[in-house]
Image (spheres, grey):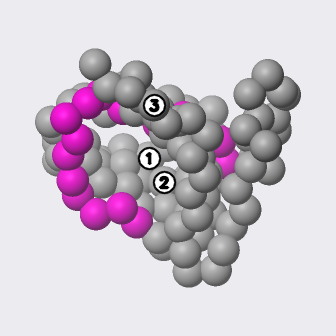
């Protein structure tokens, strides 16, 4: 089931797994992608950059996000826009879920 045209509860679309990062792609096309991530506490994405702007919408928990060397703490309800070609990293300081929207173009 694609979920298109249906109401979905975001927090239920990906569950937590011990010592892991779980992801579920909801949309992926030439315009961009929408992916839900669930991080166990302490899990991280190492520093990297992307050629497109990306938006992180925090669904649950807390994380430390570093963008261009600047660290910030984010929590449920927060939104962060990560600019294209700027190094960024993320570390879950508690169990943490985020919706990542990648904008291509």
Q: Which residues are magenta?
A: 44-60
Which residue: 72% across, 62% down? 15
Residue appearing at x 56%, y 57% in the figure:
23
Whether label 3 touches label 1, CB < 8 Å: no
Q: Quadrant of residue 85?
A: top left
Q: Which residue is mark 2?
A: 63
Does the stretch in magenta take in 51?
Answer: yes
69, 12: nearer the viewer: 12
Distance Cα–Cα, label 3 vs label 2: 28 Å
- Could you tell me which residue is drawn at 37 percent across and 55 percent down? 90
| Majority secondary structure of magenta residues | strand
**Residue 59, percent from left and from top:** 65, 42
Q: Secondary structure at mark 1?
A: strand
- Seen at 25% across and 47% down, the residue is 88
Q: Locate residue 81, reporting x and y percent.
A: 37, 28
* 26 in relation to 95, above or below: above
Percent x, y for residue 49?
20, 46
């Amino acid at each position: 089931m694609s979920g298109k045209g249906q109401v979905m509860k975001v927090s239920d679309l990906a569950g937590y797994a011990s010592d892991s990062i779980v992801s579920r792609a909801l949309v992926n096309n030439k315009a961009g992608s929408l992916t839900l991530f669930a991080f166990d506490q302490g899990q991280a994405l190492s520093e990297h950059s992307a050629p497109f702007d990306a938006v992180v919408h925090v669904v649950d928990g807390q994380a430390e996000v570093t963008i261009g060397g600047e660290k910030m703490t984010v929590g449920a309800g927060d939104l962060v826009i990560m600019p294209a070609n700027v190094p960024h990293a993320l570390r879950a300081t508690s169990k943490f879920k985020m919706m990542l929207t990648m904008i291509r173009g």
